[in-house]
Amino acid sequence: TEAGLSLAMLSMIVRPLVDVTEYMPTELARVLAGAPPDVDGTDAFALGAGLLAVLSDAAKSAPLLLLLDDVHWSDEVSLRAVVFALRRLDRDSVGAVLALRDVAVPSLDAAQFSAIELRPLDLSGSGSLLESACSRRLPSEVVLKLTEVTAGNPLGLVELARLLPDDALEGTSPLPEVLPVGDRIIDGYVQQISDLPSSTQRALLVVATAVEENSGPI
């Protein structure tokens, strides 16, 4: 929701570090104070250098791990500062894990960080995840069906395990023809659709309406 606000992600990174470092460069202090950012190239460099100094100082007392999720939604100014700092943390006890969808993020692509591609779960992995989510082992035919309809997506599997009735999960009654969709999945699709051009959104609305009229709820 704050992807359009410059320095939003940088503020979220730096604020928790105030308690573990006494060093706060002027540019980052302005971020914490909520000052309107100057987003030209000079400030981007200063922000990156400042973040590097803060992370390095904070890691002197204990190793530091930076976890950033949904980086593809980050504001560009924050992302450039983060990339600048991470590329220079080769002598400090700082690690970082950045998670993003399979989309192009030029700032990260250019950095050439080591990457791990998460693939869909296979049948065995889906069964283990569903067993953990349901606190019991599900019948193999139920695991197979849920794996097929979610294409092995972990979030989809966990959401269905939460929304489906027990008798459907146990295999004593058939799974509904139209599977329920949780709020978290809907929110994800809403975000993806909102990033599309308005003409594409209208086309999707027309298609969805046509499908619903001919096939029932989707």
Image (tube, helix red, strand yellow):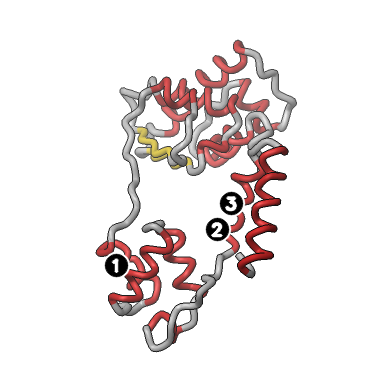
Residue 128 occupies quadrant:
bottom left
Label 3, label 1: how far apart the Cα atoms are: 26 Å
Image marks 3 and 2: residues in contact by CB distance under 8 Å: yes
Q: Residue 86, image x and y in percent? A: 41, 26
**What residue is drawn where x is 66% and y is 40%?**
200
* 39 lies left or right of 171: right
Query: Which residue in the protein does label 1 denote?
Result: 128
Crowd band around label 2 with a 10 angstrom C-alpha radius: few (<14), some (14–19), many (20+)? few
Image marks 3 and 1: residues in contact by CB distance under 8 Å: no
Crowd band around label 1 with a 10 angstrom C-alpha radius: few (<14), some (14–19), many (20+)? some
* 99 lies left or right of 127: right
Q: Amino acid at mark 3?
A: Tyr
Comparing 148 with 39, the one in front is: 148
Q: Residue 39, image x and y in percent? A: 66, 19
Quadrant in which the C terminus is drawn: bottom right
Comparing 73 with 153, the one in front is: 153
Comparing 180 with 111, the one in front is: 180
Query: Which residue in the protein does label 3 denote?
Result: 189
- Mark sitting on residue 185: 2
**What residue is drawn where x is 65% and y is 33%?**
32
